[in-house]
Image (cartoon, rainbow, N blue to C red):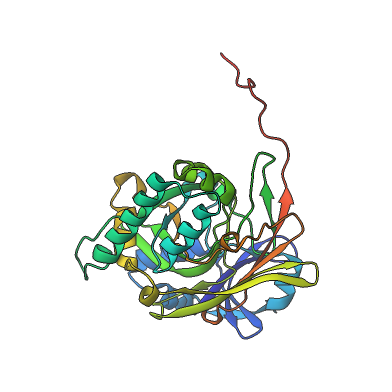
Amino acid sequence: MRLIQFETASGQRQVGVIEGGQVQQVRGTASTRELALAAIAAGRGLQDEVLARGTEPGPQYRELLEAGRVLPPLDHQDPAHCLVSGTGLTHLGSAATRDKMHQQKGQDEAAMTDTMRMFKWGVEGGKPGAGKVGAQPEWFYKGDGGIVVRPGADFPVPAFAEDAGEEPELVGLYVVGDDGQPYRLGYALGNEFSDHVLERRSYLYLAHSKLRFCAYGPELRVGALPAHLAGTSRIRRGDEVIWEREFLSGEENMCHSLENLEFHHFKYQQFLRPGDVHVHYFGTATLSFADGIKARPGDRFEIEMSEFGAPLVNGIASEGEPLAPGAVRSL
C-alpha cells in the first residue's frame, strides 16, 4: 500500500491510497499522523486501519501533482514536533563518494582518516543481527518540520550557501505513540539536499552543511522493503538532462541494517516524546557533486524508484538575505 497526503481544491487536507492513476480517499482522515495514532490505539497496523475506515474515489493523482497539492506523506501540525535527521556513511559506496568529493580540493588526511574509520566500523559491525546492538553510524540533525518542502516545490537556498546539491535517499517515517514507543509507518523517497562545498572545506562543517531544506515523498510505502533497491537520480536544466546516475539502496547495498540505524536514533530518551513525528534519512552513495556538477536556481532534481510510485521532483530558488551580523538584540 502507498499513501499520500494532499489538499483538495478548497484547501482541505486528506489522506489517499494510490491505485494506478486514481487516488482513493480514506474516509474521515485529514492526516497520516492521525491515521497512525488511531491504528496504534486500536492495536492494528496502518493498512488495517485504512481498511477499517474505508475509501472512496478521489481526484486523479496526476492532477494533484501538477497542481502542487500533494503534501509530504507524513507531517505534524506543529512543525516543532517533527524532527528531521539522518545518518551518513551507511551505504557500501558512500565512503568512496565522500573520498572523491574531498579529493577535489586536496585531501584533508585527518578528516578522511576519520571518515574511513567510521565506514570500517559500519562494515564490520553495522549488521549485528536481530536484537543486537551494532556500530554507531554517523548521525546529523537537519531541522524541524519547517525545513520540509512539499513534492514539486523549490528548495529555498540561503544567500550564504556555497552549494545546492541533491542527495537521493530512502527515508524512514515514524510516529511516537502515547506509550513512548516509536512506530515505523513506512518509507519514502527523499532528497536530503546539502551544501557540499561547505562540507568539503572541512569535515567539521558537516553539521552546518546539513542545515538546509529537504523533501520526501510523494508517497509513503507501507510495509517491508526489498533488500535490493535501484533508482535513478537526475538533474534537468531546462529541457536538457545535465546529469543522471543510478543509485542503490536497501540492506544488500548498505553496511548498516535498518534496525541498527533505528536503534541508534531512538535510543535517546528525548526522541521518545509521545505524538512526535520523526523523519530519518538513511544515507546515499550517489551525488552529482562528486562528478563535478554544480546545480543552480532553475534546475530540477528528479529522484525515482519504481517501488515508490511517482518520482520526487524539486527545484531550486534563491532565499532572502539572512539575519545581519550584529542583529541579535540584548534585553
Q: Quadrant of residue 175?
A: bottom left
Residue 36 visible to the viewer: yes
Q: Residue at x 59, y 59 (%)?
A: 289
Q: On the image, which quarter does residue 161 sit in?
A: top right
Q: Residue furthest top?
A: 331
Q: Nearer the viewer, residue 25 or 311?
A: 311
Q: Is residue 179 left or right of residue 38?
A: left
> Residue at image x 58%, y 70%?
4
Residue closer to the observer: 315 or 45: 315
Rendering coords of residue 269 (x, y %): 29, 46
Residue in view at x 28 percent, y 52 percent: 267
Q: Is residue 274 visible?
A: no
- Front position in the image: 238 or 273: 238
In the rendering, at what x and y percent does residue 317 appear? 73, 52
- Residue 292: x percent and y percent? 62, 60
296 sits left or right of 257 in the view? right
Extreme left residue here?
132
Name the outermost residue toward the right. Answer: 239
Please state the horizontal and vertical placement of residue 44, each as a whole percent of the image.
Answer: 35, 73
Which quarter of the rendering shows the C terminus? top right
Q: Which residue is at the far bottom? A: 20
Q: Is residue 44 above or below residue 33?
A: below
| Residue name at image x 38 percent, y 79 percent | 227
